[in-house]
Amino acid sequence: MQINFTKMSGAGNDFIVIDNMQGVISLDHEQIRAMCTRRTGIGADGLILIEAAENGDFRMKYHNADGFPGSMCGNGGRCAVYFAYLIGIRPAGTRYAFQAGPDRYEADVTGKESVRLHMNPPTDFRSDLQIGPWSCSYLHTGSPHTIVYTDDLDHMDVYAEGKTIRNRKDYFPEGTNVNFLEVTGPDSISVRTFERGVEDETLACGTGAVASALMSYRMGLVSASPIRVKVRSGDILEVGFNEQMDEIYLEGPAKTVYQGTITLQDN
């Protein structure tokens, strides 16, 4: 089986994106894991199938790098919208609506390789969680996120500390993404994220950037919206929101890296 794919990057979060609007492609988790594995496969943080939807322009069917279905991915959503724009699912200059899991999202292509994704309101705010030496906060922005503040982000061992917190089943039965962040100004933060499903630090995390910005505002550590979020790749994501946090957007780059064809054994 030969599959055409597009490799995309959302601020360093990289994805394999496949047009499956005709519904002819079926991949099992081992095939997806092999495609996402670096050095021996294409290599990516996740795989996105663009499929037909009853309630929207398309459905984003997202899988983590481990091959299993994932929850909402903000940077993946932005890449999915730009891919839909490139293949002409909607006319230029119109707003996209798509399904991801049980939810519906809207987005705008705001420029060349730039997408603004309108996020759903966050849920399940928790603060003052003491996990080992870390004072943590938690919220759900389409995916679960734990927030840890530090004054020395550059020297943080994100892999080791993130893996430990991610696997605390007593706090997070379904696991959690872990964001380590440093406040760098009244409207700016820097974030590094350990992502579940990838099981490593990634160069960016969209829902993590949103979670980090909202929690920082809620705790009074930043004072303005939008908030500029610097991620590990060096790119800047912008998170804007109103006082009630029921109107939220995530904006940043969504770029095509290359296109190719991969041959898989039939499943």
Image: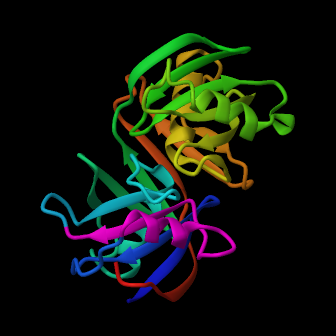
Residue 113 appears in the figure:
no
Quadrant in which residue 7 is drawn = bottom right
Residue at figure coordinates x 53%, y 85% from the top left: 259
Residue 262 in the image: state x and y as whole percent: 49, 87
- Answer above or below: position of 148 versus 41: above
Residue at figure coordinates x 57%, y 12% from the top left: 129
In the image, residue 54 lies in the stretch drawn in magenta: no
Residue 214 in the image: state x and y as whole percent: 51, 28
Position of 12 with respect to 225 (left or right) is right
Task: Give the residues drawn in magenta, as a range.
Answer: 28-52
Quadrant in which residue 136 is drawn = top right
Residue 57 in the image: state x and y as whole percent: 22, 66
Residue 222 appears in the figure:
yes
Residue at figure coordinates x 68%, y 53% from the top left: 203
* Quarter of the image that includes the N terminus: bottom left
Question: 132 or 97: nearer the eye?
Answer: 132
* Quarter of the image that includes the C terminus: bottom left
Residue 84 in the image: state x and y as whole percent: 35, 73
Residue at figure coordinates x 72%, y 55% from the top left: 233
Position of 195 with respect to 140 (left or right) is right
Position of 40 with respect to 246 (left or right) is right
Residue pushed farthest left?
54
Number of residue marks:
0
Quadrant in which residue 141 is drawn = top left
In the image, residue 34 lies in the stretch drawn in magenta: yes
- Answer above or below: position of 71 versus 8: above
- Answer above or below: position of 99 versus 209: below
